[in-house]
Image (spheres, rainbow, N blue to C red):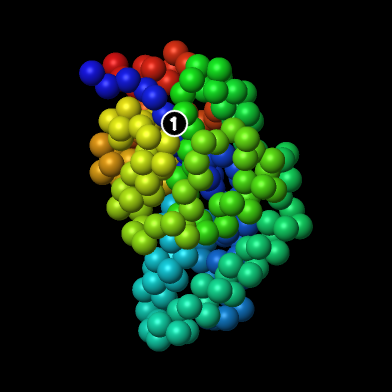
Amino acid sequence: MAEIKACIFDMDGVLVSTEIYHFKAWKRLTETVLGFSIDEKFNENLKGVSRAVCVDLILQHAGLQKTPEEKAELAAQKNKWFLEYVQTEITPANVYPGVIEFLNVLKQSGIKTAIGSASKNAPLLVEKLGIKQYFDAVVDGNMITKAKPNPEVFLKGAELIGVSPCDCVVFEDAKSGVEAAKNANMHCIGVGSPAVLTNADFCISSFTEMSLERLKSVLI
């Protein structure tokens, strides 16, 4: 019988409010380099997937063709702008309400924790946010080759902390992330709207809603 031995957290939009900086960087790229604009609705497609996939989605959306070298340059420029925002604007105050309290509950309960993020900047964010001590492992975009909804990022997290996938609960804010968790044979709690994250076991709007009892209810 499955039990909860670990929680794996996506980074952007789950633990910390960095999505706005990704959106600002992508929007800046499309407007100043590619000559068109994206809105917040389209930005939903860019959540939880790798930088390279984001570039492909943006180019497809605009009907543009680019060489692999040009795509790499676009991704690098976006990341440069994103890192500027992170370096100047991200502090521990950006951690979402209730996150630290819930992580402390997990530690006290002997439940392992990991970050499973497609972002190659996850280690930098962990340092800027001052949350490194709360996690047993951090899996980032430098450690994986397949984008969500492929389950690689979460399976790697489970492997690093020595927990069977069926005993893991993933926290995700993106549809592709929820699918990745399910493809990994893990439970998944959505952080956001149940109308969007339809395949999550259940959804929360904030970690202030989470408790050990609420976590265990995912098994019912």
In the picture shown, does residue 98 fall above or below 150?
above
Q: Which residue is mark 1?
A: 7
**Identity, as a three-letter code, of the amino acid under mark 1:** Cys
Determine the image quadrant of residue 161: top left
- State whether residue 129 is above or below residue 169: below
Image quadrant in which the C terminus is located: top left
Report x, y in % for residue 24: 62, 62
Q: Is residue 2 above or below residue 94?
A: above
Q: Is residue 109 above or below residue 24?
A: above
Q: Quadrant of residue 83?
A: bottom right
Q: Residue at x 62, y 46 (%)?
A: 126
- In percent of width and height, residue 97 lies at 64, 30
Q: Is residue 166 left or right of residue 15?
A: left
In front of the other: 91 or 33 = 91
Query: Which quadrant holds the N terminus?
Result: top left
- Residue at image coords 51%, 72%: 75
Which residue does the image show at 47% across and 60% down from the upper left? 142
SS for tag 1?
strand
Across and down, in percent, residue 191 comes to 47, 35
